[in-house]
Image: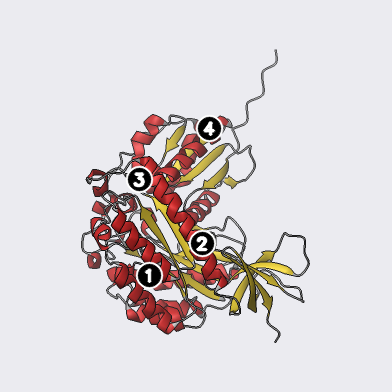
Amino acid sequence: MSSSPPSLPPARTVSLVTLGCARNEVDSEELAARLTASGWELTSDGDASVVLVNTCGFIQAAKQESIDELLAAASSGAKVAAVGCLAERYGSELAGELPEAQVLSFDDYGEIGARLDDVLAGRKRPAHVARDRRTLLPISPAERQPATSSVPATSGAPASYSSTVVDPAAPWTGPGGGVFRRRLSGGVVAPLKIASGCDRRCSFCAIPSFRGAFVSRRPPEILAEARWLAANNVRELVLVSENSTSYGKDLGNLRLLEEVLPDLAATEGIERVRISYLQPAELRPGLIEVIASTPGVAPYFDLSFQHASGRVLRAMRRFGDRERFLALLDQIRDRSPEAGVRSNFIVGFPGETAEDLTELELFLSHAGLDAIGIFGYSDEDGTEAASLPGQLEQAEISRRVEEFASLADELMTQRAESRLGETLDVLIEEAADDGLPGRYLGRAAHQAPEVDGVTTVVSPVPLAAGDMVRAVVTDSEGVDLIADVKPR
């Protein structure tokens, strides 16, 4: 009498899908490192035993994309787990709507390998009940850093990391052996998280409630990670957080970013440092000076204006108006006339009038922005704006988005044309795929990855990814530029 051979346990393979912003990209690389350390094999094949989806929960379109990705993963036959902002924000509510997926919290990140073991074995854990993560830390920023035990997993790195760069082929590890980050993609540009969370109370934004209060990473941690990234052939660092202008306030030094930027730019192997997510209300003259004039720091200002009507901005619980914002841009361009500036704007906010839209149009027409993002307002659960009077019909919001997106395209094209004849420092990322010899794709200082335009560089000599070349702009195509390598 023969017996059936024992069945083999399913392979511990995981496919990691990342949605949303560059901050989520860093989170995914941290998750990847922890999974690798716990014996999971990362794969991009379609036959992974578990699909881990790092979701986005910022706006309705991003939420829907996350849900669609989870459903698609489930239909493949794999076990599915959801992490990230959507999972954190809705917890058990999302689990009830999507029984196909195990919904995990930020608090599960430290034990992500064990959590996926449960998913693989079919052991369903109760999903977390969503809560306001701002309550996990003291209200006063100055009291947060000593309370390291209460800092959520996504609020920064562990308390201390060695300044020694380990084998660049391996994930970055801390002095206690804990794995922290593993790169998931190549490329010469990488995000570097300097802080997590936000203390602002914009009436339309729910991010602080599920990302938590603002917590800065300490400079030695950031500098050590920068060295590790440089050893991994990264040549440009993009500093990310929910609000980079708040960096250092919980460490007792509101000028700390001004001090750290030159050190990051001096990191061996790093050609350029770019900072993102700046709040106009917190942009100090000293920080403008450092960004505009420090060698190796891109004179690039990613400013979160959101609107230009003072009345609408007050309803958003934000600072400024058209005149103040134009004056701020004048300050920047007094220090760096060719500085790059990008911003996003919300149209269709509750109570927005024709006069408010005129203010926004006037601002955009005079601001000379390199990159402009136009978004339609959507109600976000738990936000003050969702209950404001003057809610607009979706059709009207869509009409305003279309109108201002068209204006933005025209203005960005004009701004690109105005750069004809400029000499730019372009970081080469890859060969152009247009079939023409001697053409390479890169980004100038005013062009951030993913969100802005690119520069096609024409060179008589071969170039490689990571080369920084000086090139003269000869033409433009929409927001994109064409430039010839400048003879030495």
Real-space Cα distance between discs 4 and 3? 28 Å
Distance from label 4 to label 1 (Cα)?
Answer: 39 Å
Where is residue 52 drawn, in percent x and y? Answer: 51, 42
Answer whether labels 1 and 3 touch (C-beta < 8 Å): no
Question: Could you tell which of marks 4 and 3 lies nearer the N-terminus?
Answer: 4
- Three-letter residue code for mark 1: Arg
* Residue tagged 1: 218
Mark 1 and mark 2: span between their CA atoms?
A: 42 Å
**Residue visible at 56% across and 75% down in the picture:** 419
Which of the marked residues, 1 or 3, is nearer the chain's N terminus? 1
Q: Which residue is mark 4?
A: 74
Say what secondary structure mark 2 lies in: helix
Q: CB of mark 4 within 8 Å of CB of mark 3?
A: no
Is residue 105 something one can see in this rendering? no
Residue sitting nearer the eye, 219 or 197: 197
Position above or below: 403 against 147? above
* CB within 8 Å, label 2 to label 4: no
Task: Using the numbered discs, state the Cα–Cα distance from disc 2 to disc 4 in whole angstroms.
Answer: 42 Å
Going by the image, does 279 lie left or right of 479?
Answer: left
Mark 4, mark 3: which one is toward the viewer? Answer: 3
Disc 2/disc 3 C-alpha distance (Å): 25 Å
Q: In the rendered image of this protein, does residue 476 appear above or below residue 316?
A: below
Q: Tell me which numbered mark, 1 or 2, is placed earlier along the sequence.
A: 1
Give the structural element (helix, strand or loop) at label 1: loop
Q: Earlier in the sequence, mark 2 or mark 3?
A: 3
Residue type at mark 2: give it: Glu
Give the residue type that dot 3 points to: Ser
